[in-house]
Image (tube, rainbow, N blue to C red):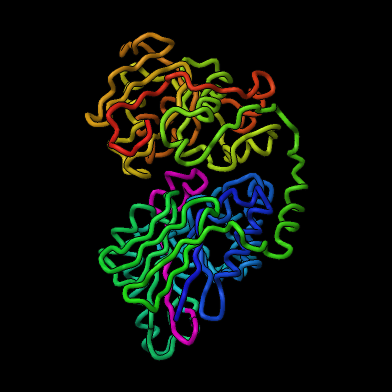
Amino acid sequence: MVRLVHYSDIENVFDAPERAARLAGRIRALSGPDAAVVASGDTTAPGVLSLVATGRQVLDFYDATDTRLDTFGNHEFDYGPDALRGLVAEASATFVSANVRDEDGDPFGRDEGVVSWAVREVCDETVGFVGVTDPATDSLNPMAADLSFDDPVVAARDALAEMRAAAAGSGDGADGDHGGESGGLDHAVVLSHLGAGDDDLARELDADAILGGHVHSRRNETVAGTRLVRPGVNGEAVSEVDLGDDPPTATLHEPDGAAPAPGLADALAERMAAADLDEVVDTVTEPIERSGDVVHGGECRVGNFVADAFRWVHDADVGLSNAGGIRQGDAFDGGVTKADLISLIPFEEPVALVSVSGAELHDVFREMAAPDVDFGEDDWWHGHLSNARVVWDDDAELILEATVGGEPIDPDRRYTVAVSEYLLHSEHEYPTLAQRHRIDEADIQYEVLAEYARERGIDPEIEGRIEIRNRAVGDDD
């Protein structure tokens, strides 16, 4: 039996060192001489500890779990290409990447040890791996703007062909990281940070399994004879893939109950202690949930808090927070620290102020439902508002009501909207918004949340800002 133990998008799991240690403990328990531990991106960032350690906290995790391979997610580039190159050079895991190109158009990170494919011997069988990253990363992450991303299907197909040719021959002469490849290849696996693009890979490539990430919901199914598995976000689950089955099978395991990996929590706590982020900015008496179902389910208390803080700092007509920018984690309960607020929005980007026409604002409100944008799951709601109300008909994909300050939107009036700067350079969400609308900026987002909490407190309520009608049976309103 040849198995892979796979994790992805662990992001802010490091902000709770004991939780990270339990996750590592579950991975260690699932691993063994017949298994290899691999990852598929967004393992270094974002998060509070990630900001403190510029992603290097993952080095402790790689060592604790004996992770052999990883690929790049969009957040690996949060601190810029040079910082990532340094991390790659230090990592015990090998990064596999077939479609990322550097500032000069060359394959990224080759001098630091990044390879387009790798072959590993697992339980006397050879398993080949290629890695691919979302080609929209240069839009998703401004720190990756100087890089380019090849078509992942074409890049993965070329890497697989090169890997198979090398495995069938001498194994020399290609840029992959080779080992145990004499006599051909027994299994081929793609480490993917594409999200929905995994289906295209499955239909177009000859691969046994695609171990995915990027989209923060779990997945475990077979498409075109290929096992597709995705373990979710923040270490909620670990996937165990059995390549010996035909087709391969997978099981998702939760970390609860696992014995913590020895020494990892202490190592992460030491890194966190250097940040001095324990200041309590306010106390919450009613827990504020921030699970994925809550954040993407429509109006929620945490979304209202963020949108209110954004509007407050600019005294804007409207505050708008994209749901994808609100990171999932434990509910806020009791004393809320600055570290908690960083974990909520752990990005080094300011709150921007834009000026839009009423007609454009109406389009922005429609984009909260993302009916025309392929991002996330079909039933996700993508935005949260302050000083505005939207009534959305999900069946008709139509706004029934849109108001600002209690008044219908005037299509000819100009409105100011406070938003994450990310929305101005991303083509992935809210395509109506662009840099041309920008008129001002405030502090970094988590600093704004902290200042708002100190002055106004953290006590958001559900007020009917977003009403979603005619959702399919089983969805939340």
Magenta residues (range):
120-148
Could you tell me how many numbered marks the image carries? Answer: 0
Residue 153 occupies quadrant: bottom left
| 394 or 47: nearer the viewer | 394
Instruction: Identify the residue at horizontal 34%, vertical 58% (top origin).
Output: 198
User: Does residue 41 lie above or below 424 as drawn?
Assistant: below
Viewer-nearest residue: 373 or 391: 391
Is any atom of residue 80 visible in this view?
A: no
Locate residue 71, reporting x and y percent: 49, 62
Q: Is residue 259 left or right of residue 167?
A: right
Q: Answer left or right for 380 relative to 71.
A: left
| The quarter of the displayed image where residue 211 is located | bottom left
Give the residue drawn at x 36%, y 26%.
364
User: Where on the picture, by quarter, is residue 2?
Assistant: bottom left
73 shown above or below 378: below
Q: Which x, y percent locates residue 439?
A: 49, 22
- Provide residue 370's location: percent of width, then percent of height: 33, 35
For the C terminus, which image quadrant? top left
Q: What residue is shown at x 59% (from left), y 69% (from top)?
A: 29
